[in-house]
Amino acid sequence: MENVLVICAHPDDEVLGCGGTLLKHKSKKDKINILYVFEGSSGRNKIEKSLTDLNLQKRKKSALAVAKYLKVRSINFLNNENLNSNSLTKLKITNEITQHVDKIKPTIIYTHSSKDLNIDHRNCLEAVLIATRTSNSNKLKKILSFEIPSSTEWSFNLFGSFSGNYFVNIEKFIKVKLKLINMYKYELKKFPYPRSKENILSQSKFVGSFVGFKNAERFEVVKILD
């Protein structure tokens, strides 16, 4: 049985990046834990605090609904201010992630890619790498980076090219993944926007075709310990 920890920047990233894979873990009765590092709203509405608070409430409600469906073992919201990359924030989130990793002792971590346009995503990965430096006391076997539509491709390789080399067959789970995504329907837009259900379905087919799967999610291998 795997002990999975998803460390993502914002509520909705867990479904967009690895929703099908988490459903597969659920089917295997693996333990699933989710940690949200940033709140994901304040950077959008610096003037209207009421709009920020409303969006925060919606995002948390959606995240809890997703967690309930996935039968998540633990879910935590760190609520750090998003789009904030100062050194004190980086130190704070690194310490917080370290505490959660030490407590949960995951065998697999899913997190963001260094190739994303969104700075919260890149800061999240950086903190994860620091928090998971080699230790004889941890049980970690894999760290995998996922891609996020409307962030990974929108960097246009400015931070390097996302090179997925670890593929998960989600053919049996794609319909349910789309239902989970719909729990964040206020974050979706109509096709051809990258974060649309049509594009997410097409992306799963496109990625799957690389390796002979009808639908897949792909990841970059950050670290594998055997």
Image: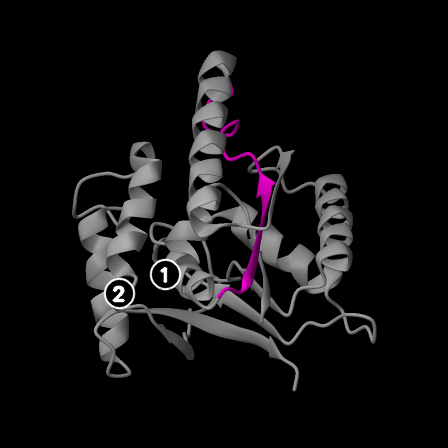
Q: How many marks?
A: 2
**Residue at point 66%, 59% (across, down):** 128
**Residue at point 48%, 72% (across, down):** 220
Disc 1, SS: helix
Residue 167 falls left or right of residue 121: left
Q: Position of residue 112 (x, y in %)?
A: 52, 58
- Decide which of 206, 176 is in the foreground and name it: 176
- Decide which of 10, 32 is in the foreground and name it: 32
What crowding class fits label 2: few (fewer than 14 Cα within 10 Å), some (14-19), or many (20 or more)?
A: many
Say if 12 sits above or below 19 in the image: above
Q: Identify the mark at residue 20; answer none if there is no mark.
A: 1
Quarter of the picture containing the N terminus is bottom right
**Residue that mark 2 sits on:** 204
Q: Nearer the viewer, mark 2 or mark 1?
A: 1
Say if 34 sits above or below 185 in the image: below
Q: Which numbered disc, 2 or 1, marks the residue that appears first in the sequence?
A: 1
Callout 2 amino acid: Ser
Q: Cβ–Cβ below 8 Å for labels 2 and 1?
A: yes
The CA span between labels 2 and 1 is 10 Å
Callout 1 amino acid: Gly
**Residue at point 44%, 70% (across, down):** 219
The residue furthest right is 136
What residue range appears in magenta? 29-46
Q: Position of residue 7 (x, y in %)?
A: 58, 53
Q: Position of residue 19 (x, y in %)?
A: 39, 56
Residue 179 falls left or right of residue 29: left
Residue 155 in sight from this viewpoint: no
